[in-house]
């Protein structure tokens, strides 16, 4: 039997065991403004940045596939310890919006546990996440290669870090950071707020999916469409399972596979495009 999806726990609600009790109910305007601020400080801003980058790529001489989009680049070439400091700084500060979401939920007497981001069901989350990653990973690679071959996508370079001891740990941390940031905000938090604001399930699904596609637009049309479709799948699974935990696992595995896989295979196999 399928598990029930997340319920609309708009105020007032009975307190959840182990979570603080809300003192007051934020107004719809506060919820709306808070949501816009969270997005403006995180993935909404990334969407605007990606759009500007895409316009720049379109107006540059040559086709999209002859240009490269690098994801994990060196921040201080030739200075590995300084580079490591910058990498860890970037990973840590990128998670501040998640801490802000946790703060806003705390004000309601809730927590990230409300979104299903906790350690209460580690094995089911891991199993579901691995299954989702296996399906999306195989189709995603095929779609990327096809989109690039048709000239709709830039050549994506998942990593361009120096060959130092911290390279692979940083790539893994970067993958996990991306996953936590995106799934907590774009799925769990955004859907919760849109539900509280009275949006229909269809409108919420569209908003979440288009947002996910928007901040991947720097990769090209293929990156936008592919991630938007992934967003539809992730919203459906979240509504079904009521947890972002499996989605964080799936996204982490996908990004680890892309980052570490590229580092190991680039230049060694013919089917993997390189810059």
Image (cartoon, grey):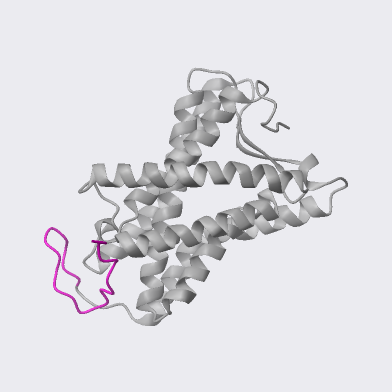
State the residue lying farthest toward the front.
1
x and y percent of residue 192 in the render? Answer: 36, 69
Magenta stretch bounds: 1-22
Q: Between residues 137 and 187, which one lies in front from this camera angle?
A: 137
| Residue at the image point whose x is 43% and y is 79% from the top | 200
| Residue at the image point whose x is 18% and y is 75% from the top | 13
| Residue at the image point whose x is 35% and y is 65% from the top | 239
Magenta: main secondary structure equals: loop
Is 46 rendered above or below residue 119?
A: below
x and y percent of residue 251 in the render? Answer: 44, 45
Residue 192 seen in the figure: yes
Q: Between residues 86 and 72, which one lies in front from this camera angle?
A: 72
Question: Which quarter of the figure is the N terminus placed in?
Answer: bottom left
x and y percent of residue 99 in the render? Answer: 35, 53
Residue 91 seen in the figure: no
x and y percent of residue 66 in the render? Answer: 80, 40
| Residue at the image point whose x is 52% and y is 29% from the top | 260
- Is residue 117 inside the magenta stretch? no
- Horizontally, residue 20 falls left or right of residue 163, namely left
Question: Which quarter of the figure is the C terminus placed in?
Answer: top right
- Is residue 4 inside the magenta stretch? yes
- Horizontally, residue 169 falls left or right of residue 54, namely left
Q: Between residues 145 and 84, which one lies in front from this camera angle?
A: 145
Is 5 rendered above or below residue 183?
A: below
């Amino acid at each position: 039997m399928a598990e029930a999806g997340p319920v609309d726990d708009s105020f007032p609600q009975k307190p959840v065991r182990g979570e603080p009790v809300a003192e007051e109910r934020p107004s719809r305007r506060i919820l709306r403004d808070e949501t816009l601020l969270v997005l403006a400080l995180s993935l909404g801003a990334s969407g605007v940045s990606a759009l500007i980058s895409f316009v720049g790529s379109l107006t540059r001489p040559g086709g999209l596939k002859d240009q490269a989009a690098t994801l994990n680049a060196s921040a201080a070439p030739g200075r590995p310890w300084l580079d490591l400091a910058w990498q860890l700084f970037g990973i840590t500060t990128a998670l501040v919006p998640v801490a802000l979401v946790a703060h806003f939920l705390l004000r309601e007497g809730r927590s990230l546990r409300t979104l299903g981001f906790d350690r209460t069901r580690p094995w089911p989350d891991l199993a579901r996440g691995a299954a989702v990653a296996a399906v999306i990973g195989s189709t995603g690679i095929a779609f990327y290669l096809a989109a690039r071959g048709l000239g709709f996508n830039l050549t994506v370079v998942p990593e361009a870090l120096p060959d130092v001891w911290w390279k692979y740990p940083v790539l893994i941390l970067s993958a996990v950071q991306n996953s936590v940031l995106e799934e907590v905000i774009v799925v769990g938090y955004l859907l919760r707020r849109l539900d509280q604001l009275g949006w229909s399930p269809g409108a919420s699904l569209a908003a979440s999916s288009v947002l996910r596609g928007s901040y991947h637009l720097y990769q090209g049309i293929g990156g936008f469409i592919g991630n938007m479709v992934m967003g539809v799948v992730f919203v459906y699974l979240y509504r079904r399972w009521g947890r972002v935990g499996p989605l964080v696992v799936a996204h982490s595995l996908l990004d680890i596979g892309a980052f570490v896989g590229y580092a190991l295979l680039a230049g060694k196999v013919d089917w993997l495009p390189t810059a």
